[in-house]
Amino acid sequence: MTKIAPSILSADFSKLGEEIKDVERGGSDYIHVDVMDGHFVPNITIGPLIVESIRPITDLPLDVHLMIENPDQYIEQFAKAGSDIITVHQEACPHLHRTIQLIKSYGVKAGVVINPATPAELIKPILADVDLVLLMTVNPGFGGQSFIDSVVPKIEQVSSWREELGLSFEIEIDGGVKKGTAKRCVDAGADVLVAGSAVFKQEDRAKAIQDILNDK
Ligand SMILES: O=C(CO)[C@H](O)[C@H](O)COP(=O)(O)O
Ligand SMILES: [Fe+2]
């Protein structure tokens, strides 16, 4: 069963708690939290305080996507704030194994992310250590961007390695996912679809979620 992870980046922050409840009722599997530092990406969003404040609102796993430089410095804070999954960018981690082990040391699931232009070969050595691989289908930094089609073969590639290596990490896709692009991701091997604007910018969030999951 394909999972959906609405990204609160596109939610109305003035009523974030209600927004999260709405997508939870609408059938979400994870809540995706986009953390941006204005350095790794050209935008600033939220920090551990927000993760801590939304933690009591939902029992859904908080899937925290760190788009920050030097993530090692902040992993403890995000873990203690209540993250269930923390994903770090390969491009931001010179010592990727160490960073993945640091996340796991707090009892949190660990994921690795790559940008659209980063070859999947660069994360092959870490696949046996991660719970999740996040493949960006936009350049990180903003919601509402267009899906980059050239990432689809990379989804197939990572999915085939997972089978060959007998591993069980989840493959998550992030950026421009909506009805029309979701099917291509799922057909290529994606398990979890992040969707920001395609969920939160719609009035009926339950319908928006079903439209994405039923993309045929
Ligand atoms: O990581 C992200 C951007 O860097 C977001 O998760 C992503 O862009 C979701 O927004 P949308 O579905 O509107 O593209
Ligand atoms: Fe994200």
Image: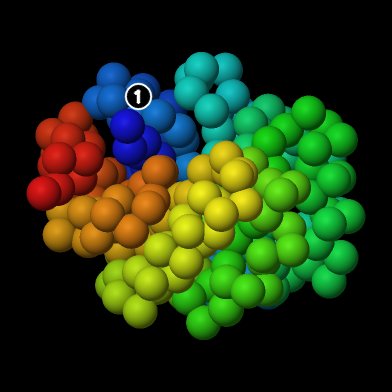
- 57 sits left or right of 86 in the view: left
Q: Nearer the viewer, residue 13 or 175?
A: 175
Q: Quadrant of residue 146?
A: bottom left
- 146 sits left or right of 100 in the view: left
Protein image colouring: rainbow
Residue that lies at the very extreme toward the front in this rendered image: 164
Rendering coords of residue 16 (x, y %): 42, 34
Q: Nearer the viewer, residue 216 or 63?
A: 216
Crowdedness near tag 1: few (<14), some (14–19) or many (≥20) residues, C-alpha within 10 Å: many
The residue at 85%/46% (across/down) is: 101
- Residue with the mark numbered 1: 24
Q: Is mark 1 within 8 Å of ligand 1?
A: no
Q: Nearer the viewer, residue 97 or 200?
A: 97
Rendering coords of residue 93 (x, y %): 78, 67
Determine the secondary structure under disc 1.
Answer: helix
Res. 136 in view: no
Rendering coords of residue 140 (x, y %): 50, 69
The residue at 67%/54% (across/down) is: 127
Total labels drawn: 1
Q: Does residue 73 sit above or below 12 in this rendering?
A: below
Res. 211 in view: yes
Q: Quadrant of residue 40?
A: bottom right
The residue at 33%/37% (across/down) is: 2
The residue at 86%/45% (across/down) is: 102
Q: Does residue 107 sit above or below 12 in this rendering?
A: above
Rendering coords of residue 47 (x, y %): 66, 47
Residue that lies at the very extreme toward the bottom in this rendered image: 117
- 149 sits left or right of 50 in the view: left
Q: Nearer the viewer, residue 161 or 178?
A: 161
The residue type indicated by label 1 comes to Glu
Q: Quadrant of residue 1?
A: top left
